[in-house]
Image (tube, grey):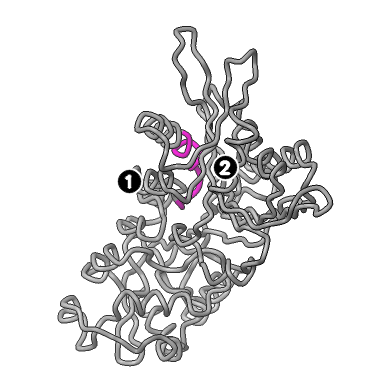
Amino acid sequence: MLEEKMGQSQECLVSVEAAENKSEFPIVDFENYETICNVFNDGSRLRGILSSEMYEGIINDPDTVFVNAGGSRIPVMMDVSHGLAMGYDVKRCQDYAQELSTNVQILTLPPHELSDDEKKELVDSIKSKGKCAIYFSDHNNDESNALSAMFNDAGIKHDEKPLVDPRAANGDEQAALYLYALSAESNEDKVERKKYSLQDILDYYERNVGPLRSFEGRVKTTLDMGDKISDQQAEEMWNIYNERFEFLGDGHPISMQDSKEDFLKLLRSDRTMVAITSTEEEQGEENITCFSYYIDDFDKLYWLNRNYLNEKFPSSEYATNIFTPGVVSSGKGASYSSLPIGIFIKVCDEAGVSANMLFENTNLSKRYIPKLIDRAMNRLCNNLSFKQSEIVDECTYRLWSIGGADE
């Protein structure tokens, strides 16, 4: 199977120094590894290792497991210490797996797409490692079904440790990520129909709306482009983001939290719009309590499968595709969380912005973020016809204990 996929890539395989102590075969380069992982990817998130720099460290790790395909070696399993390269939170993953094994691995290829020979090689490698724990993403149960069949045929014991969050709604406790979509279309009889960029939306805001004040004028909500916010504002937003996502990440192996460098790079872009709610303190100082941000350049969303997005949400004459990482509130600003979302929706409605708005949720945040957005749309939209947010894709994350032969 991998040989077929490699044939669909550029067939440009390069030898790496790490191959010398692994095999006489060269290790596939990152560009072709990425193609192999995603050429048949029908999910919204990219599969496999996300960073070429981290890929180099992984293929040079003597503990990385490879499979042979087409005269080349491709990494199929890596140590959990490299988890960030696939979005996993290393410390949380180690903590969740500690009762299962100290040998914790992450699958780096989609196992259901391996050929019979490649599956056998993976099984043999797992057998040689002895008892271990394995993390993997499971899209439409493809991976769990394939692994169960492989391990059953080989007589390898495998048990799942549920990754659950009791704060989630009934039925949603297992760790998962969901892609939501909300579509809105301007009513031609009320506004002129045209395609808007985020900069166009800001121009309308500055001409016709301006800052919104509430609660006796002490709470202010504004819109701006990310490259125009101050260093102080950016630092305040990072502090809120860092604290809240650490709390919300409990019970989930995937880190929804970017590094500070990646967060600021995305936030302070000229293709990112930022909605900020601030409160005025008695001393006259303004402190940011919550914010949301919106991106119309999907090339910046390095973890998403752009082929999937382009197929599901193709470019149109009027609709703008917008992604939002959601709303982030400080502990004392949670009651204001509807304000930054509300100002963005209000301006889009008044201007008549047709759009597909996409956002991700964990199994925990799906309890409240979609409701928050849908309520704002119901309350504020007069010029837009819209469909309320719905799940368009889902990926479950699993942790299995592997090891010991069935008798």
Q: Judge whether residue 403 can be spotted in this image.
A: no
Please tell me which residue is depicted at 28% across the width and 62% down the height of the picture: 54
Please tell me which residue is depicted at 67% across the width and 65% down the height of the picture: 317
Q: Name the residue under label 2.
A: 203
Q: Count the labels in the image.
A: 2
Earlier in the chain: of badge 2 and badge 1, it is 2
Instruction: Say if the magenta span includes residue 389.
Output: no
Along the viewing direction, whichever of 245 and 352 lies nearer the viewer: 352
Which amino acid type is shown beneath numbered disc 1? Answer: Glu
| Lateral position of residue 235 relative to residue 1, left or right | left
Examine the rendered structure and indicate whether residue 329 appears above or below residue 124: above
**Image quadrant where residue 185 sits:** bottom right
Along the viewing direction, whichever of 260 and 253 lies nearer the viewer: 260
Between label 2 and label 1, give the one nearer the viewer. Answer: 2
Q: Start and end of the magenta stretch?
A: 244-254
| Lateral position of residue 3 relative to residue 165, left or right | left
